[in-house]
Amino acid sequence: MACYARGCAAARPASRPLRTFANARASSSSTPIQRRQLHPIRLSTYFQPTHKASSTASGDDTLASLQLLLRGGYIRSSSSGVFTLLPNALRIVRKLTAIIDSELHAIGASRLAMPTLLPAKLWRQTGRYEIMGSELYKLRDRRDSDYVLGPTHEEEVTRLVAGEVESDRQLPVRVYQITRKFRDEPRPRMGLLRTKEFLMKDLYSFDKSAADAAAAYDDVSAAYTRIFDRIFTGAHGRRWVAAEADTGAIGGNKSHEYHVQDAAGEDTLITCTKCGYAANTEKAVSMPDPQHMPISASDVRVLLYACTDPDVHDTTIHALVLPATRELNAVKAAKLSSSLAPGTQLLYDSASPSPAQWDWKDRPEGPLIRYSTLAVLADFECASLDPAELNDALATALSTYSSPSASPSSPSLSLGEIFPAQFNGDAPVAPALTLVDVRTAQANDTCSSCKSVGSLHETRAIEVGHTFFLGERYSRALEAGFLPTAALKATSGAAMSNGRVPFQMGCYGIGVSRILGALAQKAAADFTQATSKPGLLWPRHVSPFTAAILVADTRDAAKLDAASRVYDGLITKARTHDLSIHAVLAGILGEPTQDDVGWSSDEAHEVVIDDRRAQLGAKLADADLTGYTYRLIIGRHLTPSSPHIELQHLTPTGLHSTLIPLETICN
Ligand SMILES: [Zn+2]
């Protein structure tokens, strides 16, 4: 019987030679490969509308980097918080997405593209249609169907994956997209830093168990470290930081933010100079500080919370106490109050005391009548407060709240009088304390990680990435899960009503257009530091171009011809030696380069020829705004007897100039 299996020599007809990679190369080497003609980008036909200083001022937005992005022809404003990315910005974005793609493919994530127009039904199912409120763009089509413009895609991707995955054998799934997202931002400003429409990378992970999902979280965190190192680490060191974060409206129970420290940022980070601890101020913690610990009742701030909903039976009033010298952390306080009975509200705050609005004539029993128990949530710094002083502070707060007038002269009731079942008579009795962290950590506090005294600092930062461990937050709401195989059945958690086990999920964002804004902030500062002039010095791997050939006088045919020869010379060297354009130019200057990329046809577009009919001065000013690493100036040194060009190298230490014989590049 004939054998047709792959690799079975007996089945192969003897007359047909086996074609291998080795002989394929040998046979084609006899006829030279016809290489595709490569064309330079010529600025005379390239769309980069540049402007002189101060001609593009945009409203009262005075962010220096935004002005440079407008002047340099990177972006244009379409409407408030909405921008067009011009070709130069798009080149940077492509380089950013290439970095993101390579690192996410390395952890087994696949790129897809989901729609922007999303049915509202799923958003109602997860509750986010209401939770996101007016930040969500909502619209209705001609058939009266409701849609949203996607700000993120948890609902959509969960439905997508649930429809394709049957059993845990098909897990894990890691998918991501880089698409435009929308948020009805109430105060768009700071250029690309706070916009209504933005480019975002969002990745979603689906796993069969919480342990697998935690491993996915760690994998993505490691990929984020590599991504942000490639984008934000260079001559000035590492410029980004990962910070512990609050989980906010997306939900879940583990979260980190990725920040670029910058004075223009709208987030505040608490960082430790000793151990590297970093957290968003909403989440940051610090060690209790003896300097702030209250001694007397007047040193304490008291907030009273209770359920006021007549349909909920809850008779406990909760007092939250913290040192009066400390700032209350609103996010921590909101989280605490949301863990209490449904309908719990803030009734009173001693920092702005006002009595209850109460109809004393019709209801003389007073506003505390419903409550029979007092529970005390005390910040850690109040743990050792004298019980008599604490009682005093609590009684004063309760009396002020429940008195017909806020007159400070009206006598305080004792806790025993207000809660006779809980407290006996007038003797000061310490109510049981539940210790909580509710104050805002601040500069000069003691680090809770390494215990270094006074080592915490506050810095402003731009958030460029965010990771969330979601668990079952979305999969349970959307009944999205898998049928467990027998091996997993015993260990997996409770199945849903459809018999499936919910996915354990994570979601991970990177703000791509915001990274462009953050990079511009750094590029503007770096250029000015290097040259004392306004301009942009981009990190080399993401700058729009590596080099520009500037022709001083385009009416001079010899100069135009030399520009073409320089371009061809650079491309030939790069192609022949499998080098990037950067490596070729660094080699000509005799500078060491640790370039990790070789030749690709993309390198042909890393060099532009500035052949516009303009003065050399104007071309150099535009070059400052584009931030070419190298400028090859074809001007007065191109003499017939000894033709030279000026090679300028832009580095963090300045713009360094060298005269190079034309033949060095063209040979
Ligand atoms: Zn520390």
Image: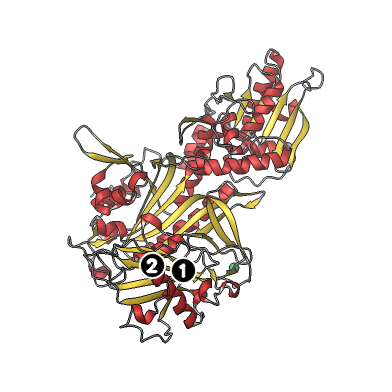
| Residue 513 or residue 213, whichever sits in front | 513
Q: Is residue 629 above or below residue 162?
A: above
| Apparent side of residue 475 relative to residue 29 in the rendered image (left or right) | left
The local crowd at label 1, few if under 14, some if 14 to 19, many if 20 or more residues have their Cα within 10 Å, is few
Q: Is residue 455 above or below residue 551?
A: below
- Residue 26 image point, x, y percent: 51, 36
Q: Residue at x 69, y 13 (%)?
A: 557
Q: Amino acid at mark 1?
A: Pro
The residue that mark 1 highlights is 408
Nearer the camera: disc 2 or disc 1: 1
Position of the C terminus, as image quadrant, is top right
| Residue 257 or residue 343, whichever sits in front | 343
Q: How is the image coloured?
A: secondary structure
Ligand 1: give its quadrant. bottom right
The residue that mark 2 highlights is 401
Where on the picture, by quarter, is residue 567?
Answer: top right
Q: Amino acid at mark 2?
A: Tyr
- Helix, strand or loop for disc 2: helix
| Residue 596 or residue 652, whichever sits in front | 652
- Choose the circle earlier in sequence order: 2 or 1: 2
Total marks in image: 2
